Amino acid sequence: DKKNVTKTDVMNLLESAGFSRSNPYYIVKQGCINQMAVAPDSQRLKLLREVAGTRGYDERKEESLGILKETEGKIEKIDEFLQYIEERLKTLEEEKEELKEYQKWDRLRLCVDTTA
């Protein structure tokens, strides 16, 4: 196609076709077959995921979940800061109204003082 693509795009395409970066040939040595036969289920599952090429997706999923958790933490901090700003704004609005009231009465007092 003569299109420019990133290395990540090429790697994703190869992984989706069954070629894994960690095990590009899916060759399992004879000694490993025996180890796999007596290995616990969790270890066999890990090896099968690697052979199937899903390990890369699992790693990216974990990375994405980490980023998501970090982003949610940032959103929570922003919400707390926004709440603080809204409370402060409300307080300032109340002080502004008090100041207007004070200035009104102060002008009235000055008018009374100058007429008396």
Image (tube, helix red, strand yellow):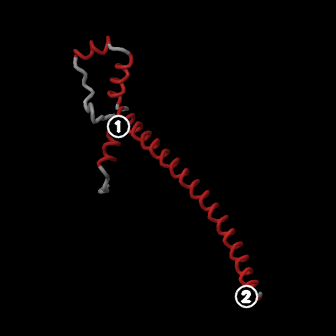
- Rendering coords of residue 6 (x, y %): 31, 51
Q: Quarter-wise, where is residue 92 in the image?
A: bottom right
Q: What element carries label 1?
A: loop
The residues tagged by marks 1 and 2 sit, at their Cα atoms, a distance apart of: 93 Å
Q: Given the image, on which type of amino acid does mark 2 rest?
A: Thr
Picture layout, residue 22 above or below residue 71 = above
Which class describes the residues within 10 Å of circle 1: few (<14), some (14-19), or many (20+)?
Answer: few
Picture layout, residue 90 above or below residue 100 = above
Mark 1 or 2, nearer chain start: 1
- The residue nearer to you, when weighing 50 against 96, is 96
Picture layout, residue 65 above or below residue 30 = below
Q: In this view, does 3 lie to the left or right of 79?
A: left
Quadrant that contains the N terminus:
bottom left
Q: In this view, does 91 lie to the left or right of 15?
A: right
Query: Which residue in the structure is indicated by mark 2?
Result: 114
- Rendering coords of residue 68 (x, y %): 46, 43
